[in-house]
Image: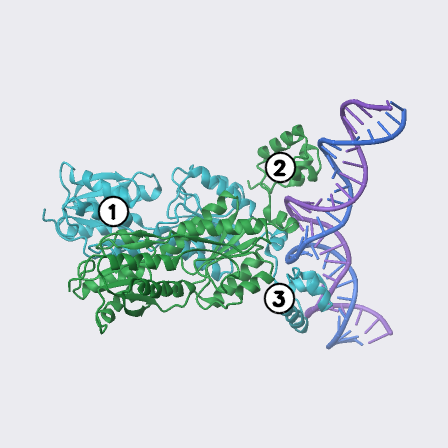
Chain colours: A cyan, B green, C blue, D purple
Amino acid sequence: MIRKKVTLAEIARIAGVSRATVSLVVRNSPLVAEHTRQRVEQIMADLDYVRDIGAARLRNNSSRTIGVIVPNLVNAFFTEFLSGAEEVMGLDDRVVLLANSRDDAPRQDQILQRFRGHGVDGVILCPAQGTAADLPDRIRRWGLPLVQSLREVGRDATDYAGADYVAGVGLAVRHLVERGHRRIAFLSVSARTSAREERLEGFARALAETGAEDGGIVEAELSWEGAMRSARRILDLPALPTAILCFNDVLAAGLMAGLRQAGCQPGRDRAVVGLDDLPLAELTYPPMTSVAMQPAAIGANAARLLARRLADPDAPVKRAIVQPLLRIRESSGGARC
Amino acid sequence: MIRKKVTLAEIARIAGVSRATVSLVVRNSPLVAEHTRQRVEQIMADLDYVRDIGAARLRNNSSRTIGVIVPNLVNAFFTEFLSGAEEVMGLDDRVVLLANSRDDAPRQDQILQRFRGHGVDGVILCPAQGTAADLPDRIRRWGLPLVQSLREVGRDATDYAGADYVAGVGLAVRHLVERGHRRIAFLSVSARTSAREERLEGFARALAETGAEDGGIVEAELSWEGAMRSARRILDLPALPTAILCFNDVLAAGLMAGLRQAGCQPGRDRAVVGLDDLPLAELTYPPMTSVAMQPAAIGANAARLLARRLADPDAPVKRAIVQPLLRIRESSGGARC
DNA sequence: ATCCTGTTTTAGATCGATCTAAATTGAGGT
DNA sequence: ACCTCAATTTAGATCGATCTAAAACAGGAT
């Protein structure tokens, strides 16, 4: 019942032409005569021929496969990113090899080896926490085109797709200042990544520009529960901030739950602002003010950068930076308690 | 600076043995003498040899690649599923080709062809809405092992990994009945999938078993906003239900927002219960009672079923069904207005 | 020395598509 | 009839690893 695989050679035999000719037809070469092309295409359709891309790659070195490595598949930030990248790759008839580094650098190394063995044409990498700064260089020496995204190591070493985190944090801080907040705290994460540094830098800069006071930087584990537990530490800060800006929406949501548990109503007693504007920002109570980083657009950019790099390996290094948008909802209200 | 690829032949030349021997070393065959193995392995390590899996597949027909097709990459239900599957595949040193069908059957067909061309060893498919019932058969005729998951067409046609949706809905209904609700509505989706049918069937069955009254079945578009708009229609139902069970958490969250907008407080005035227990269930206000379907566990099961099928193509068809768990929070409170 | 046996190693073909360089075809010009 | 030139087609090698079937080798036993 299971038919044996239909190959180029078989099509050629039936059509009475050589394998080379059929190969030209498959690749839409203008070299074949129109009537030959039609006959061969008819036969391919009849026999349900599927071109073996692996075999093709062996010869011409293009697998139409790209690897994508993300540090997390639960956080919507990364899955929207992935979704954007997959979408654009599909348009180009490329296929995505997916792997989750779980933010673990050794695991990430393994994955890269695996991808290498599978002959990917290029890699989109969101580097795990603790990735060695020379990783981009090592990858380059393998002859593997690389685009970093969302995070990066070795700044300017490779093409990069991201959002302007610094500006995004600036939007949030200015919004809070306009609402009359003077002392703003930042709920950060412990994991050291470029995304964290940029957000912290944006925070410091925006404080300087607006003249608002640094309400303190508190670190939480990157999880809903971690942020919830951090509420206590924030309320115990020597000089109580009236607003708290959070590293991302997940932390902001957890913090809001924690504050409420401690009898403090976010959006009324304390302002809370998130970053990323994930769908969950609309679901929290009260709905969360956040800054949209548009991860799907970043993913799409990353895919386009990689496509460009594959087309021209010697093109100059390029950065595609998405501008963030402030989404005002209700969690950034006043400060009464 | 870019070194040429290191091949088996090169290792063989340097080690002074044949390609065949090196190949045996690569595959950990017991046929090679210990000292040869060590010498060869040393050289492979020194030269940073990476085995070309594509070339290997061409000969022995195993690419250690499996395709996963999901209908959506934004809904956490599917990304958790994906995460579970990717995880287990990685343990087995397999790699995941990911694609998003966007719940579109023709697109899904294209993807399958693409996967076929890439020589995947097998496919985990969550069939798109409107998938032809004979698709599993067609895929079988291609000689491509298939596991369906989360949804299925042509029941019992293939291995299947899922959750017991019928039982899950039963848990929710019984919980509501225990809380004193007698008239329960169901907020469903328009997209026709086996998951929808099962949940509806579970609803009908649970009503029959508990003697509760069918409060009506309302359909919404599968999105947060769609559910929000449906609140009006539910409140306009001829006989107002005291509780609404929703097809999934996304709908339940939207419905809760819509109800609140209409001046009805979920969890106090009307009970709302979701299905799936996504992380967002903890973030809604009030926190949502839901039934955990454990998509990550389902994904892991799907991967294991496929691994089993690859090991033994003639094994009998098997189903792996996860038992759902009721998570009681606050949205399933009383009915006062 | 010779034969046997079990252990290691290997030459050469193979998977399916593509590349190179060359052959074939056919039309038009002389 | 012969030559040119462009348009088509093709034989054969090639990519890198694995398979098959057979060869080489070592260590006893005779």
Nearest the camera: B145 or A57?
Answer: B145
Query: Which badge, 3 or 1, is on the more N-terminal residue?
Result: 3
User: Mark 3 belongs to which subunit?
Assistant: A
The lab-note entry on whether marks 3 and 2 share a chain reads no
Q: CA distance from mark 3 to mark 2?
A: 37 Å
User: Mark 2 belongs to which subunit?
Assistant: B
Q: Is residue B142 left or right of residue B179?
A: right
User: Mark 1 belongs to which subunit?
Assistant: A
What residue is rendered at 30% in x and 66% in y?
B187
Residue type at mark 2: give it. Answer: Asn
Residue A36: image location, x then y, percent: 68, 71
- Residue A48 numbered tag: 3
Whether residue B61 is visible to the viewer of this picture, yes or no, is yes
Label 1, on which residue?
A254
The lab-note entry on whether marks 3 and 1 share a chain reads yes
Relative to A177, is B13 above or below?
A: above
